[in-house]
């Protein structure tokens, strides 16, 4: 199984996918509609449009975004170049992202000169799917990965077509997205419970523009002249549609807003109607899975999401974890005791210290060493007894009940 958290995952992706079998799409609209169907456009991926199916189960949200990002960039390359050569794609992608780094600063300089282009692209994609917030802040606010990754795909298209990137392209696209979303939120007939989180999602995702409360009163006030390509226009319309959605419908006034937006962008009404229907069906079907539509209990949602992610990591590293824990008789006894008794302050401190030492030896578990990571230790302590039930049963029997 492809593991985007481990080195070499891009090469493995192309080996498994046999991309020479890739079927060229006949139009940009077909590319867009297939990409939108995966959820990539909305920052909530529900599938991958690949030759060989890739399961989402047992993957971290960040890993899903990485696969989605790589595959969408590659499909854009195939569309523009009408070519499936994965080596040329990877080389072009690395060259493209090198254009985005400020002079005098290049995170790839930290890599060995001999590093392959695929390893460089892994580093780039890892950095791009992150938001501007730290791990625990974005988990608590439900912002898991960058919500506007598709802007990268649009910019990559420009680069492939021209061999360069128009000056401040990202700034202009982000500014258009922000302006439309800000106005669409103001245009809603009623305030939705998810509006603040939705705005925060985009606010933490922008890289080149500040998400400010723009003084825009109508669509006529927005300058969208920089949106020249249908893909850019489709994208803005769909994002406006998802921000207008509330209570399982888009009201007539909000539909009017979308039609006016389509008119300004010179997009046919049938696309607007299809966009409204798609967004409505997508949200209704996946609402319970989309973080910013589930903010009724932020603390519970934070705990549920974090627990799910940590358990995935622990399952992947359970053999190593069992080995490390088994080497400490005291730790085994303390964890066993914790399953049926309340530990005193000194015992809890010992467990914390020893488990953090173990996490230092397992790279995938360094999440527990990050600021605030110790708050997740109860999840780890609760998980360990499931790995060694027989050993813990013996300990429980030897530990007399007071």
Image (spheres, helix red, strand yellow):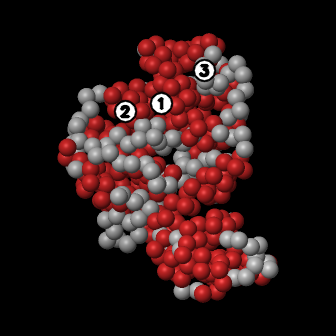
From this view, report whether residue 23 is shown above or below residue 240: below
Work out which quarter of the rendered image holds the N terminus and state it.
bottom left
In the picture, the disc for residue 139 is: none
Q: Is residue 77 left or right of residue 256?
A: left
Q: Are marks 2 and 3 in contact (CB under 8 Å)?
A: no
Say if 66 sits above or below 151 in the image.
below
Real-space CA distance between mark 3 and mark 1, rounded to the nearest whole angstrom = 20 Å
Q: Nearer the viewer, residue 195 or 16?
A: 16
Q: CA distance from mark 2 to mark 1?
A: 13 Å
Going by the image, does 317 lie left or right of 96? right
Q: Residues within 10 Å of mark 1 (few under 14, many from 20)?
A: many
Image marks 3 and 1: residues in contact by CB distance under 8 Å: no
In terms of secondary structure, where does tag 3 sit?
loop
Q: Which residue is mark 1?
A: 235
Residue 34: mark in rendering: 2
State how far apart marks 2 and 3 are (Cα). 23 Å
Q: Residue at x 39, y 35 (%)?
A: 35
**Residue at 52% over, 71% down:** 387
- Asked whether the beta carbons under mark 2 and mark 1 sit within 8 Å of each other, the answer is no
> Can you tell which quarter of the image residue 133 is in?
bottom right
- Observer-nearest residue: 44 or 126? 44
Image position, residue 232 (x, y; %)? 45, 30
Whether residue 20 can be seen here = yes
Q: Considering only order in the chain, which callout, 1 or 2, is on the residue closer to the N terminus?
A: 2
Q: As drawn, is 87 to the left or to the right of 128? A: left
Left or right: residue 115 versus residue 148 is: left
**Front of the two marks 2 and 1:** 2
Residue bearing mark 3: 249
Which structural element holds mark 2? helix
């Amino acid at each position: 199984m492809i593991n985007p958290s481990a080195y070499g995952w891009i090469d493995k992706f192309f080996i498994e996918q046999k991309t020479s079998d890739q079927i060229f799409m006949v139009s940009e609209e077909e590319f867009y509609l297939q990409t939108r169907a995966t959820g990539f456009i909305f920052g909530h991926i529900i599938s991958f449009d690949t030759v060989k199916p890739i399961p989402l189960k047992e993957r971290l949200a960040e890993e899903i975004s990485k696969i989605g990002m790589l595959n969408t960039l590659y499909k854009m390359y195939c569309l523009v170049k009408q070519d499936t050569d994965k080596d040329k794609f990877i080389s072009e992608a690395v060259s493209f992202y090198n254009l985005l780094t400020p002079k005098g600063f290049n995170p790839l300089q930290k890599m060995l000169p001999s590093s392959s282009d695929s390893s460089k692209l892994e580093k780039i994609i890892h950095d791009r799917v992150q938001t501007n917030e730290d791990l625990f802040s974005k988990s608590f606010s439900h912002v898991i990965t960058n919500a506007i990754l598709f802007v990268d795909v649009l910019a990559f298209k420009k680069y492939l077509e021209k061999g360069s990137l128009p000056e401040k392209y990202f700034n202009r696209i982000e500014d258009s997205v922000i302006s439309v979303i800000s106005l669409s939120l103001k245009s809603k007939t009623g305030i939705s419970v998810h509006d603040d989180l939705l705005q925060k999602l985009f606010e933490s995702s922008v890289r080149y523009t500040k998400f400010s409360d723009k003084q825009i009163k109508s669509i006529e006030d927005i300058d969208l002249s920089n949106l020249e390509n249908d893909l850019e226009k489709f994208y803005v319309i769909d994002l406006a549609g998802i921000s207008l959605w509330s209570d399982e419908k888009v009201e007539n006034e909000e539909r009017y807003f979308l039609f006016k937006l389509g008119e300004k962008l010179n997009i046919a009404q049938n696309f607007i109607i299809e966009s409204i229907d798609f967004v409505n069906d997508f949200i209704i079907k996946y609402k319970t899975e989309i973080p910013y539509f589930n903010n009724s209990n932020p603390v519970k949602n934070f705990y549920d999401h974090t627990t799910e992610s940590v358990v995935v990591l622990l399952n992947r590293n359970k053999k190593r974890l069992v080995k490390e824990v088994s080497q400490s008789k005291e730790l085994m006894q303390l964890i066993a005791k914790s399953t049926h008794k309340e530990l005193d302050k000194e015992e809890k401190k010992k467990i914390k210290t020893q488990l953090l030492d173990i996490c230092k030896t397992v790279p995938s578990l360094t999440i527990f060493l990050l600021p605030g990571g110790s708050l997740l230790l109860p999840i780890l302590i609760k998980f360990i007894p499931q790995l060694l039930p027989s050993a813990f049963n013996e300990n429980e029997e030897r530990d007399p009940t007071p």
